[in-house]
């Protein structure tokens, strides 16, 4: 007998059903689209309205945060309904 402890050959990895992968795909897609849309609106708004770089950065941050918050609110129900 050897001094090394026995290690199981392989440990099963828990896997999600395919419908839960679809939910996650939709959630990630929604976050990306809403955040990018917020960034686009923020860039346009800050470029048109402000000359100061601090005001531009604050406007951009507010718009990106708003897009992220909208996506979070919309996806919260999807994730809860899927039981993730």
Image: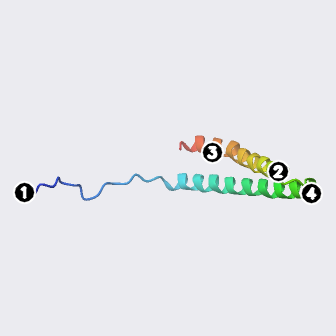
Which of the two labelled residues, at mark 3 and mark 1, occupies the earlier sequence position? 1
In the structure shown, which secondary structural element does the residue marked by tag 1 occupy? loop
Which of the two labelled residues, at mark 1 and mark 2, occupies the earlier sequence position? 1
Which of the two labelled residues, at mark 2 and mark 3, occupies the earlier sequence position? 2
Is residue 6 found left or right of 54 in the rendered image? left
Residue 4 higher or lower than 70, as above or below: below
Within 10 Å of disc 2 (Cα), the crowding (few <14, some 14-19, many 20+) is: few
Image quadrant where one finds the N terminus: bottom left
Q: Which-is-in-front pick, marks 2 and 3? A: 2
Residue picked out by circle 2: 54
Question: Which label was assigned to residue 78?
Answer: 3
Position of residue 48 measured from the top left corner of the image (x, y, whole percent): 92, 57
Within 10 Å of disc 4 (Cα), the crowding (few <14, some 14-19, many 20+) is: few
Do the CB atoms of the residues marked 3 and 1 lie less than 8 Å apart? no
Is residue 34 found left or right of 44 in the rendered image? left
In the structure shown, which secondary structural element does the residue marked by tag 4 occupy? helix
Residue picked out by circle 1: 1
């Amino acid at each position: 007998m050897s001094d090394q402890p026995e290690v199981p050959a392989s440990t099963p990895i828990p896997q999600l059903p395919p419908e839960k992968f679809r939910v996650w795909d939709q959630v990630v897609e929604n976050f990306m689209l809403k955040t990018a849309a917020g960034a686009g609106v923020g860039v346009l708004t800050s470029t048109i309205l402000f000359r100061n770089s601090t005001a531009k950065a604050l406007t951009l941050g507010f718009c990106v945060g708003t897009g992220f918050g909208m996506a979070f609110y919309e996806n919260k129900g999807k994730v809860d309904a899927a039981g993730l």
